[in-house]
Amino acid sequence: MGQTFAVGLDVGGTDVKAALVDDEGTIAFKTSRPTEPARGADAVLADMADLSQTVVAEVGVSKSSVVGVGIGAPGPLSPRRGIILKAANLPRFKNVPIRDEVSRLVGLPAVLANDGNAAAYGEFWVGAGRDVADMVMLTLGTGVGAGVIVEGRLLSGHFENAAELGHTVVQPGGLLCSCGQRGCLEQYASATNVARRVIDAIEAGAESSLSNTPGGVSAITSKHLVDAVSQGDPLAKQIWEDACRYLAIACLNAERSFNPAMIVLGGGMSAAGALLLDSVRRNRDQHRWSLMDDIAEIVLAQVGNDAGVIGAAGLMFADLRGD
């Protein structure tokens, strides 16, 4: 392990995860606690501080060797001001000064980042992107999170909302998204919404082996869909191929916008492995330009569920370096 540490916090609607991470990106100790956001911001902030102190105490390092606390949280938020402006899965968080409050409670400096950005930084620092300087990550879970690394730095943007690639429009006039737009990538390629499309199709009368899913049609998940694709179910194959085509469009747009060396696919749907990767690559290659041969490598994430805490800690180290 390295000689200095940072605490990484990954705040979600279900759990708050915490880890003590060394300056090489190795987790020394990690734990978690249910978020229970209905208790209000003050209670959750107190838990974040307690978890931060717990991971330091469990490892037994001196507080002087801990450089600070990195926080990954759902947005919209302002990393510069350290404030969560509003978060759909933290309904009682509005204009919460999360960075400064955690810093005050723990007695250490803190930084704040969008949770998708933090996960992308973790993958860039110690995962699939560790040997590149320019990388895009798409996290395919409840929604589609994202992060963009340009010349080794996390892209934030003028309004601090850069890399919301899940809300890029891939189908003009398409499905209504919770963000208020229509046709967002998230509606066609997130694990949740891919499953939702199967459910809607079966309820509308489409035939599928997934009609016999234990727990009923409403219990269908993206994992059920992947299994059905592997078994040759026509409806599952159609919806899966549609999702991969939309992801390929997003990858093409990311290539043209950011010119990355690598695009990393993570989140729950990445568990499909080659079934996801091969289809996205094939669809991307069918539509890419012929002007130049600057093709990003599309790969699967390597860090897994720890990317958020590792990336949050990594951003604390990066802040100290002035990156």
Image: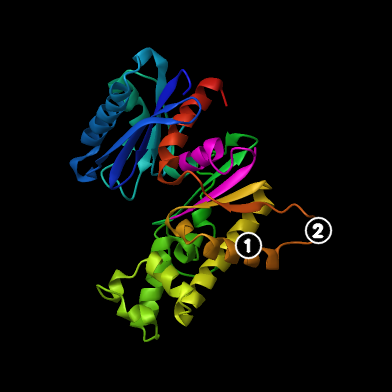
Residue drawn at (40%, 74%) of the image: 198
The stretch of residues the image draws in magenta is 118-140
Q: Which residue is mark 2?
A: 291
Residue drawn at (45%, 64%) of the image: 187
**Is 87 in front, or is 295?**
295
| Mark 2 or 1: the one toward you | 1
Q: Is residue 199 positioned above or below 114 on the image?
A: below
Question: Looking at the rendering, which quadrant does residue 193 occupy?
Answer: bottom left
Counting from the top left corner in percent of width and height, residue 59 is at 33, 23
SS of the residue under disc 2? loop
Snapshot colouring: rainbow
Q: Is residue 46 positioned above or below 251 on the image?
A: above
SS of the residue under disc 1? helix
Q: Is residue 211 positioned above or below 90 on the image?
A: below
Tell me how far mark 2 sits from mark 1, CA to CA: 18 Å
**Is 175 in front, or is 125?**
125
